[in-house]
Image (cartoon, rainbow, N blue to C red):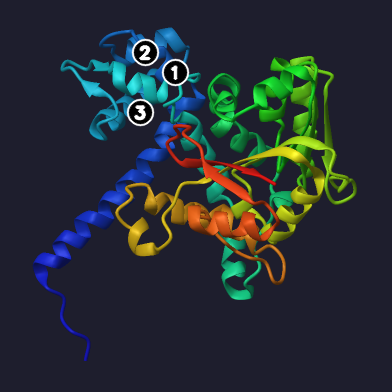
Amino acid sequence: MAEAPDSEKLRERLLHIAGMMIGAHVAPMIILGVRLGLYRALAGAGPVTSDDLAASTGLHERWLREWLQGQAAGGVLDYQSEGRYELSPETAVLLADEDGMTYLGHNFDALTHLMSVIEPLQESFRTGIGYSWSDRDAEHVASTESVFRNWYRQVLVPVALPVIDGVTAMLDAGAKVADVGCGTGIALIEMAKAYPASQFDGYDISQNALDRAEQNKSDAGVENVAFHNIDGDPMPGDANFDFITTFDCLHDMTHPEQAVAAIRAAIKPAGVWLIADVNSAPTFEENLPNPLAPMLYALSVLSCMSSGLSEEGGAGLGTVGLPEPKMRELVEAGGFTRFRRLDIPHLVNAFYEARV
């Protein structure tokens, strides 16, 4: 016979899980606020009523009133009495400043695409086979781009690249650069704009991502970038690249050791490889205290591990599957003899430099 639950522990667990359920219901309201520009309208406006917000946005007052009340009840907005609501400066940084490095609106917006895979993932639990990035539709690809865009545009060139000895001088002089797992090309395009003497090549398996990369290239007006679908146009193994980057993608790959071997074959003897991957600990017990751990493991099932298991025999490393010791082992097994962690601040990622 099953043991009867302890009443106090049951209450504590109920409150804990109910809190998750409450957050799950508030999240769609935040997504609406982001997409409708409501946080931008509230930022710096002081205490406003639903009528005020309707006047400034052109939206219907009754819908806005219910949204405002829910946001205040959830602690996103501050209620100031007499039907007036205010977006604090702190929350404005998180939900209204789209160019800010602490902006979370894109992360909430991406939830709609992540949740869309729940139905097909049920079959993955039965078969063991997940879904690769080439299976993600164009909207999912664009949403992922938005999550990473600000870091690429504001930190990569002015902060991250100068940390790596000799790289900026190499790029100034004219280098050949590859980004493996380039996605929609934002990182390459930012480097291409900053270093017009260099040539940049991006490789990915997702045609939707590469199509968007071509559009991003056109919008940026850069000519020193080319994109390749690695299935039909793989990275040449002629040791001709001076600088290679992999941003947040090794843990997603079905065969990361093959990617490392391809990078080793493509890089010059004096070349540099910049790696960004999720900053995690070697064991679950060590990851457990991380306040982001619940989100990281969920992202793994919804995206990262799914990608890594998208074909038979896939590595399925998962979001936290490449902590520093395992990354070092992977890189050194691929023929790189020098590996070090770089001092580049980031909320989620760790950065490494590898050389032959």
Q: Are marks 1 and 3 in contact (CB under 8 Å)?
A: no
State which quadrant residue 93 falls in. top left
Residue appearing at x 32%, y 16% in the figure: 50
State which quadrant residue 53 falls in. top left
Instruction: Please rate how many residues cluster around mark 1, counting C-alpha atoms within 10 Å: few if below 14, some from 14 to 19, many from 20.
Output: some
Pair 3/2: label in front:
2
Q: Is residue 129 above or below residue 154?
A: below
Q: Are marks 3 and 2 in contact (CB under 8 Å)?
A: no
Say whether residue 320 is visible. no
To which residue does mark 3 refer? 67
Q: Secondary structure at mark 2?
A: loop
* Most distant residue in the left direction: 8
> Is 192 in front, or is 19?
192
Instruction: Please rate how many residues cluster around mark 2, counting C-alpha atoms within 10 Å: few if below 14, some from 14 to 19, many from 20.
Output: some
Pair 1/3: label in front:
1
State which quadrant residue 345 falls in. top left
Q: Is residue 133 above or below residue 11?
A: above
To which residue does mark 1 refer? 97
Residue 140: give x, y in percent of width and height. Answer: 64, 41
Residue 165: give x, y in percent of width and height. Answer: 60, 29
Q: Are marks 1 and 2 in contact (CB under 8 Å)?
A: yes
Label located before the other in sequence (1 or 3) = 3
> Is 244 in front, or is 1?
244
Residue appearing at x 30%, y 32% in the figure: 70
Q: How many marks?
A: 3
Q: Is residue 293 above or below residue 222?
A: below
Determine the CA span between mark 1 and mark 2: 9 Å
**Three-letter amino acid code at disc 2?**
Ala
Q: From the viewer's perspective, is 290 left or right of 259?
A: left
Q: Secondary structure at mark 3?
A: helix
To which residue does mark 2 refer? 43
